[in-house]
């Protein structure tokens, strides 16, 4: 992947869709102007938001999906359902993207959105979904510590 300005998707940003339904990606998340790789893949999550994968992660996702046997009809059907709502896009010169209607409807995004960095990917939520998720009981320090230990952090 072309170098991102920070190399990481971190932080939380709230942005409004413009009149044409475009959403601005935070400047530090955009590929450098001279980057050859400015393609992202947006997929629906099971929890009513959108996951966005940069080129490096798209390659990993493609590798994993290619491991699903053609004889695994359940696996193939799940991939078909997921990819039927997928959207491939790039940022324009102003860092704007335009998600397809299936994804904005899935996520309930009407006017404003929350972009949440997840280090190697990012997610796009409607304000309502994001605020509802954050209002739930937060993960305890003990649970966080257990998860971090599992991953050697």
Image (cartoon, rainbow, N blue to C red):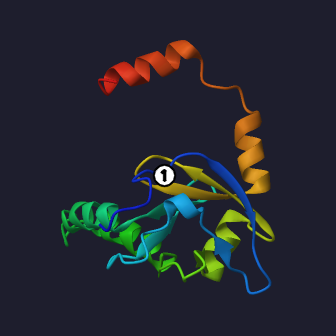
- Which corner quadrant of the image does residue 111 belong to? bottom right
Going 26% across and 60% down the picture, which residue do you hit? 60
**Camera-side residue: 2 or 74?**
2
Q: Residue furthest front?
A: 34
Question: Quick check: can you spot residue 133?
Answer: yes
**Camera-side residue: 141 or 8?**
8
Going 33% across and 60% down the picture, which residue do you hit? 57
Going 32% across and 28% down the picture, which residue do you hit? 151
Q: Secondary structure at mark 1?
A: loop
Q: In what quadrant of the picture does the N terminus appear?
A: bottom left
**80 to 48, vertically: above or below:** below
User: Number of callouts in the render?
Assistant: 1
- Which corner quadrant of the image does residue 67 belong to? bottom left
**87 to 78, vertically: above or below:** below
Q: Is residue 128 left or right of residue 27?
A: right
| Residue 47 image point, x, y percent | 60, 52
Question: Quick check: can you spot residue 45?
Answer: no
**Camera-side residue: 76 or 144?**
144
| Residue 115 image point, x, y percent | 63, 56
Q: Residue furthest bottom?
A: 20
**Camera-side residue: 125 or 30?**
30
Question: Dot 1 surroundings within 10 Å: few (below 14), some, or many (20 or more)?
Answer: many
**71 to 21, vertically: above or below:** above
Q: Is residue 2 left or right of residue 81?
A: left
Going 33% across and 23% down the picture, which residue do you hit? 150
The residue carrying mark 1 is 9
- Which corner quadrant of the image does residue 53 belong to? bottom left
| Residue 144 image point, x, y percent | 50, 21
| Residue 153 image point, x, y percent | 34, 24
Q: Is residue 27 left or right of residue 114?
A: left
**128 to 21, vertically: above or below:** above
């Amino acid at each position: 992947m072309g170098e991102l300005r920070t190399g990481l998707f971190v932080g939380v940003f709230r942005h409004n869709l413009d009149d044409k339904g475009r959403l601005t990606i935070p400047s530090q998340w955009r590929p450098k102007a001279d980057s050859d790789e400015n393609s992202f893949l947006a997929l629906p999550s099971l929890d009513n938001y959108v996951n966005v994968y940069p080129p490096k992660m798209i390659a990993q996702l493609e590798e994993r999906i290619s491991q699903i046997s053609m004889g695994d009809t359940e696996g193939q059907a799940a991939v078909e359902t997921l990819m039927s709502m997928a959207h491939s896009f790039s940022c324009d010169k102003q860092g704007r993207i335009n998600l397809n209607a299936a994804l904005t409807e899935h996520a309930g995004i009407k006017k404003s959105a929350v972009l949440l960095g997840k280090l190697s990917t990012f997610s796009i939520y409607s304000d309502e979904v994001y605020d509802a998720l954050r209002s739930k009981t937060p993960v305890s320090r003990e649970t966080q510590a257990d998860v971090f230990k599992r991953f050697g952090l």
